[in-house]
Image: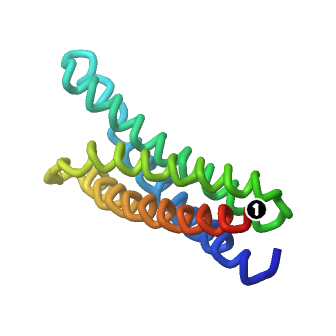
Amino acid sequence: MSALLRLPLAALSLISAYGLYHSYQCIVRLRQYEEKSEKAAQYSNTAAEQLHKTRTTQGSAAVSIILSFLSATALVFASPSTTTAVLASAVNVAATLAVRVHVKSFWDNKAKVPFTTGYNEAISGTAELVKVLGVLGGVWAVELVGAVLKV
């Protein structure tokens, strides 16, 4: 594979690394409120549901971005078959865009809370994660089209 064809994959690796940084920061900030959230969840089904959705959205974003990073990095350094490149691209398009919808649908309506700086920063960071997932999905889609055209 020529260096020019590896450029989008290298960009995917870098964008994924950027997304992983934001994902880590969000999770660390939200963990500050974990104990209080767990106590509230003992007494309120709504609080329990919110805690569960917070964990699943942040976890799914992290897993999707890790998958993107590992796939892009592997494709940069390996000489994959066309089938492998198409499959990896298709899986990443589906994963990043599905997770983007999942995360966005939960976090879009979250209001910032006074005196909870870490939580508010996590809301802003999650908005950035939604953007990163959208960019990753778009670039993986371009990579998928390129891989299919090689067939």
Q: Is residue 73 left or right of residue 113?
A: right
Image vertical order of residue 131 relative to residue 65, above or below: below
Q: Is residue 106 left or right of residue 30?
A: left
Q: Which residue is mark 1?
A: 75
Q: Position of residue 16 (x, y in %)?
A: 57, 62
Image vertical order of residue 38 relative to residue 140, above or below: above
Image vertical order of residue 87 relative to residue 20, above or below: above
Secondary structure at numbered mark 1: helix
Residue 102, by quadrant, is top left
Q: Position of residue 19 (x, y in %)?
A: 50, 61
Q: Nearer the viewer, residue 30 or 45?
A: 45
Which quarter of the figure is the C terminus placed in? bottom right
Q: Amino acid at mark 1?
A: Leu
Q: Position of residue 3 (x, y in %)?
A: 78, 82
Q: Position of residue 67 (x, y in %)?
A: 62, 49
Q: Residue furthest bottom?
A: 4
User: Residue drawn at (35%, 29%), measured in percent from left and top?
Assistant: 52
Residue 10, by quadrant, is bottom right
Q: Nearer the viewer, residue 145 or 53?
A: 145
Instruction: Estimate how packed mark 1 is, as few (under 14), some (14 to 19) or many (20 or more) residues with alpha carbons within 10 Å.
Output: many
Residue 128, by quadrant, is bottom left
User: Residue drawn at (47%, 41%), measured in percent from left and top?
Assistant: 60
